[in-house]
Image: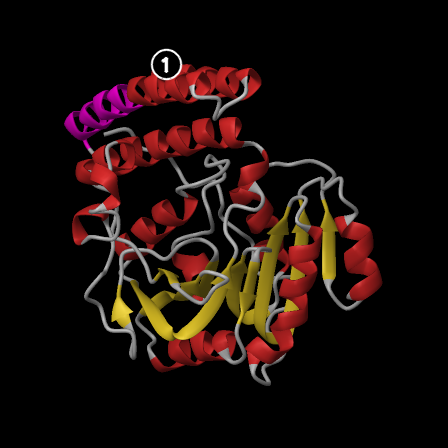
Amino acid sequence: MEQHAPTGLLEPAVVPAVADLSVVIVSWNTRELLLRCLAALDAAAGGLRVEAIVVDNGSTDGTPEAVRARFPDVRLIALGANPGFAAANNRGLALAGGRTLCLLNPDTEPRPGALRALVDYLDRHPDVGMVGPRLLNPDGSEQAVGFRFPTLAQVFLDFFPFGGRLAGSRLNGHYPRAPRDRAFPIDFPLGACMAVRRAVLDTTGALDEGFFMYSEEVDWCRRLRDDGWRVACLPTAEVVHHGGQSTGQQPGRMFVELHRSRRRYFRRHHGPVFVLAAQLLTRLGVLKETIVAWRRLRRGELTRAQWRERVRACGEVFRL
């Protein structure tokens, strides 16, 4: 099994305990959604002292200027470039002074009291290192309550979903029969919202910056568990997640980054037989995706430029 040393180890916060909760938001060209997210923080915190830190990864849509104008109390770190989701979050975590930390996507809107509920849950359960909320689609339907660690079955179902009949099943890593009125253990939450105990940074470190995008939260939670922490979902804390607003701007590149990150995760946490099987399933899957893209081009559902991008991305994933 190939080992990778975590690259996200942090020094203690510059000014510890300046707030009850530090919220770190990494943004990239999601200005309007980010402004809505920031506007929702006070109500979501339910009276807690909140420190908001925005790390901007080189946005070109006026995000830094808008944050300075609308939210002058927000701590803005304008990087001028995009070092990746994990690296940017670590920049924010290194400066966070709250006793509890929360990584929040800019395309989320936590509902009133949601962040307060996550903090209170961590306060009441000292063995829990991380807790996530129930994520909702903008129409109020459920998006996710958490996931199980990836398996070969999940790799297969990503490419061959059988009409989506198994999409929300236990086989595909979901918790379809979990309660919705009380907390329950999970392997990991979606990275859109994760409340983390500060002590986790001392025992486990922060995110591994070798992940540019995707799987960084899966790896983090795996390391938390190895260090003796539990991870939970609190479904009574609700956060609306618009989903894919940053990654959707570069679908071809994000497809490649997804599978590059999965490969890194598999090589770290599984043996060579699992890694080889995952590679074979992925190669079979991208061959299928290439055929699907050609059919969609013939039906006029893709432009030739979109088809070329998809085929190029599939080829790059095949060669990983």
**Residue 179 visible in the picture:** yes
| Residue nearest the viewer, comparing 233 with 4 | 233
Q: Position of residue 313 (x, y in %)?
A: 45, 20
Q: Residue at x 66, y 57 (%)?
A: 34
Q: Magenta residues?
A: 271-285
Question: Residue under circle 1?
Answer: 319
**Residue 18 visible in the picture:** no
| Relative vertical location of residue 269 with respect to residue 218 in this rendering, above or below | above
Rendered image quadrant of residue 36: bottom right
Quadrant in the picture for the C terminus: top left
Q: Position of residue 272 (x, y in %)?
A: 19, 25
Residue type, label 1: Arg
Q: Position of residue 5 (x, y in %)?
A: 39, 37
Secondary structure, magenta segment, majority class: helix
Q: Residue at x 52, y 59 (%)?
A: 103
Crowding around mark 1 (Cα neighbors within 10 Å: few <14, some 14 to 19, many 20+) is few
Quadrant in the picture for the N terminus: top left
Q: Residue furthest front?
A: 299
Q: Residue furthest bottom?
A: 47
| Relative vertical location of residue 101 with respect to residue 151 in this rendering, above or below | below
| Residue nearest the viewer, comparing 247 with 99 | 247
Q: Position of residue 289 (x, y in %)?
A: 34, 23
